[in-house]
Image (cartoon, rainbow, N blue to C red):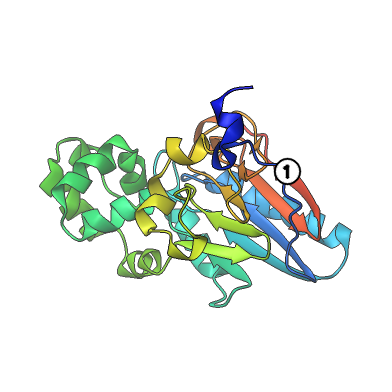
């Protein structure tokens, strides 16, 4: 027994008995990163799973990072916009990659340099930018390319993405939360960018936090959080976490 055993806020939390909202079935989808092919396949699997389990109030939630790295960000955004019902039946969260793209569109040169490091080249090429034009562009040139090639409708939709969403005993955020801060007081930057402080925390957050952002080979299920970013852009495995009542299960793609 060590010091941490006498500090209750440092103890490993017991598994939380989490329930989805009464009468609802949720499918939460992890980081897509331009893999339209995987998103299309996963949505088909969700449809089949949902039909097999019987009629209920079915809802979708997307955890953010729809763009960059993979080859077809433009088609991903186009599909998500079509799926947007404008209510809480389909919920879209924003990730750090969307935040950076919006900053580029607003003229931020530091964000333009970061956009390149985060796989923005693939995003712009998917929107029709020429590879030769991108490869010779400085940060100011990347800003010009974003403004020239990404439709205003897409940027406006990205600006409306939510920071987080609460569904009964589950709290959804792209990256996670700042431990020790009430869920209704979380800051957007933490919700989109946090890693170590959240991933290493073992305390009870007041809800099971479902997140993406931090890539793992397999789904990482802890007593206080569930990480479902399985690196789809490289692994071919795009993951959805499904919840209904006290039950939860996984759906995944397996494409190269």
Q: Residue at x 27, y 43 (%)?
A: 115
* Image-based side of 63 in relation to 50, left or right: left
Which of 33/72 is in front?
33
* Pick the front one: 157 or 11: 11
Q: Is residue 177 above or below residue 60?
A: above
Direction from residue 106 to residue 166 in the image, left or right:
right
Question: Which quadrant: the C terminus?
Answer: top right
Q: Residue, x 66% and y 48% (percent of image)?
A: 240
* Image quadrant in which you'd find residue 13: top right
User: Observer-nearest residue: 86 or 184?
Assistant: 184
* Image x and y of residue 212, in percent: 53, 45
Position of the N terminus by quadrant: top right
12 relative to 191 in the view: left or right: right
- Graded by Cα atoms within 10 Å as few (under 14), some (14 to 19) or many (20 or more), the crowding at tag 1 reads few
Residue topped by disc 1: 15
Residue 222 point in image, percent of width and height: 66, 38
Which picture quadrant has residue 43? bottom right
Residue 121: x, y in percent?
30, 40
**Residue 171 in view (yes/no):** yes
Vertical comparison of 3 with 158: above or below: above
């Amino acid at each position: 027994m060590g010091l941490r055993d006498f500090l209750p806020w440092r103890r490993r939390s017991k598994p939380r008995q989490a329930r989805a909202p009464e009468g609802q079935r949720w499918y939460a989808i992890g980081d897509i990163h331009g893999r339209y092919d995987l998103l299309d396949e996963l949505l088909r699997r969700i449809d089949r799973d949902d039909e097999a389990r019987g009629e209920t109030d079915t809802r979708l939630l997307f955890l953010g990072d729809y763009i960059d790295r993979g080859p077809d960000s433009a088609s991903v955004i186009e599909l998500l916009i079509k799926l947007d019902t404008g209510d809480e039946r389909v919920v879209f969260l924003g990730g750090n990659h969307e935040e950076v793209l919006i900053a580029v569109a607003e003229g931020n040169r530091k964000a333009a340099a970061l956009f390149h490091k985060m796989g923005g080249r693939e995003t712009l090429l998917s929107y029709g930018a020429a590879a030769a034009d991108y490869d010779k562009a400085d940060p100011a040139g990347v800003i010009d390319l974003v403004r020239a090639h990404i439709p205003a409708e897409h940027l406006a939709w990205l600006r409306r993405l939510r920071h987080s969403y609460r569904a009964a005993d589950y709290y959804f955020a792209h990256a996670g939360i700042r431990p020790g801060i009430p869920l209704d007081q979380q800051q957007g930057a933490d919700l989109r960018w946090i890693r170590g402080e959240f991933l290493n925390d073992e305390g009870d957050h007041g809800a099971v936090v479902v997140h993406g952002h931090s890539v793992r080979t397999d789904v990482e299920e802890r007593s206080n959080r569930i990480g479902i970013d399985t690196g789809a852009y490289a692994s071919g495995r795009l993951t959805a976490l499904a919840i209904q009542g006290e039950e939860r299960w996984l759906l995944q793609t397996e494409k190269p």
